[in-house]
Amino acid sequence: MQILAQNFWDNQNLDDWEVPFGLWFEEIVFWLTNNIGWFLDAVKWPVDQMLTLVIDDLLQDWLPWPLVLVMFVLLGASTRNFKVGFGGATALLACGLLGNEFWDLTMETIGMIIVAVIICAIIGIPLGIISARVDSFWNRLRPILDGMQVIHPFVYLLPIIYLFGIRRTPGVLATLVFALPPIVRLTNLGVRQVPADVVEAARAFGATERRVLREVQLPLARPAIMAGLNQTLLLSLSMVGIVGMIAGGGLGKPILTALNTSDIPLGVSAGAGLYFVGVLLDRISQPESSDKRLGLLTRMRAAWSTRADPVVPPLPDPATRSGHVVAQEAPLPIQSGHRITAIISVIAGTVAALATLMPWGEGSGRISSYVRFDDLDLPGTHSGLSATGGTFFGAFVALIGIAAAAAGLVSLVSHKALRSARVPIPVFLAFGTGIVALAAGYLTIRVQSDNYSNGLGVWVALGAGVVITCSAFLTIPSTQGDHETRRLNWRNMIGTAALGVFLIFAGASGSWLLDQRSDAQQIARELAANAGGADQGGVAASLLAEAMQGTRRATIKGLDVGGPQIGYIIVALTVIGLIASLLTRPTKGGARHARHARLARHARTQRLADAATFAAGCGITVVAAAWIASFVRLDTPQISPGASAFLTICGGLILALRGWRALVAE
């Protein structure tokens, strides 16, 4: 009600809830440049060496312009025919006739494109082949490719500048991000479109998988791969103008100069040079005459037309099968364990929501004292919903408690509906774990004032969450056999271990609080407290002037002794989720795999591990989200949540998703 009374519906009120998204990425960039500069230099070095070899040593210094023309004639004749070769050389000669400066810029542009296309081919073709043969890899890679194509080049040009600087090498790295997706996608498409009967025939004759790939799939996928190479080349060319904005050189430099100075002759000459280079490279990279010189869209349409999806006849309606109406299956009654968990969730969820109205702290603000010095001594009690009390830790407890109570009610009345309408037990487990994580996280935050004491409300909420968690954990159903043999999946285990290391690093060593305040307020407060009636105006003025000369930038980590120490609850939940997630990673195997390490043989144990992974991920997510929302609510731009809180949310969501996918798969 207080929020609504403060003109909540006014658009200007959004300034009071500004999320420091830009500061988080600034922290990430600073950390990367300060800690892994050696890795960034290792990424930059081979690109720089290739550019020096192709442009400086080969095209500009070692080869004179007649030999360059002859080289492109031979290149066009080898890839297409002599007509294309002579046409490309003519276009290149036209660039030279614009002047010696334009010839050097043209050679630099061609060299940058050649290097970018070579690197894209080295990276993209293997990625496309793996994507075509491993569906799970393609499902994970496709969203990344979508982001690389959807995001405007100016957006990812910024981190390239921050991490690698300016000039042509960072420009080529930015070009790789923009030009890589087409060759990956079309290589994947070409390999997938190889007729299945041809592949099966090769395998039937005893060909190994490597030979099938090398002698069957890749030759038949060559038109699609060449189309992807052509699109990569043209997209690399389209980045020339953008790369010129970061002093990347090439023909983008005179285009940018012409735009800034309104120089029409310079702009026309540079534009003509880019046109000739584009026509030259496009014609050389087009398919051979055996492909009937079809355009890209026609070739892609022809590739799609070769797909032969099996025709699945529609299933008859169960209600009209055999000429009579089939009675609908009656809903199964709710199980006793599910009913008990639902009842407990209704009661404990309501108690947890009401506990947020009770005192959570007394004497000072547990969280707000990190932002406002005055809250170090704040008489009175503070509820779980107040900004000086539980703030969003309490607000999230209230929301989750209400959701748990509502889910319990839905499950109790679901005997009148289909069983699918009931809330699964793992969801109750996630509700309970979320409440426990929020209450424990609030109690973990270090108290800065000796006047502070915990209120009863946070302990009541913690107890209610423990009750829901234990009830749901003990009633997790078993859906598989009692003694199913399992074997380890090392690929998933490595991914899980990497996620655990990431979360532990973010929770323990990452920044959770970014303090950019000056010391003026603190000095003034201490002087006022110690003045005792004495005239200390001169001392106060000098100290305040010294404090205001610069703004400090203090990064407080999750486990710092003088910090909030919120990282302890994150590390604890991560360890729980990591152990449980490792138990969910085995896959099915037969008796012949008995010699392998076996985990989670019992189906119930496996189900419990899946649910624990999901619940731990949810707990990590809500704690980090409550931490961010609490400081956003206090609306103090000089002190804000650190980037590790945002990264922890991302890692917690991934961990929860892994557990949920395992639950759904079972």
Image (tube, rainbow, N blue to C red):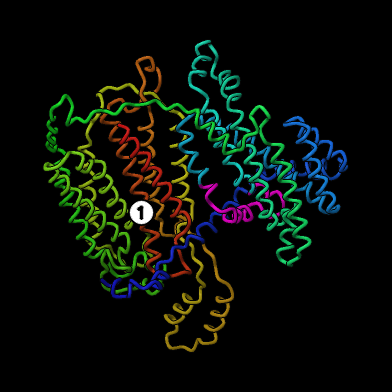
Residue 461: give x, y in percent of width and height. 23, 56
Most common secondary structure along the magenta stretch: helix
Q: Is 139 above or below relative to 512?
A: above
- Judged from the image, the secondary structure of the residue bearing numbered disc 1 is helix
- From the viewer's side, name the closer residue of 501 and 19: 19
Q: Is residue 353 magenta?
A: no
In the figure, is residue 216 to the left or right of 498? right
Q: Which residues are magenta?
A: 147-174
In the figure, is residue 247 to the left or right of 221? right
- Three-letter code for the amino acid on which mark 1 is drawn: Val
Q: Is residue 173 magenta?
A: yes
Q: Residue at x 63, y 44 (%)?
A: 176
Q: Is 580 above or below relative to 565?
A: above
Task: Check disc 1 and report the residue beneath it.
Answer: 623
- From the viewer's side, name the closer residue of 316 and 136: 316
| Quadrant where the C terminus is found in the figure | top left
Q: Residue at x 58, y 32 (%)?
A: 224
Residue 412: give x, y in percent of width and height. 13, 45
Residue 514: give x, y in percent of width and height. 49, 62
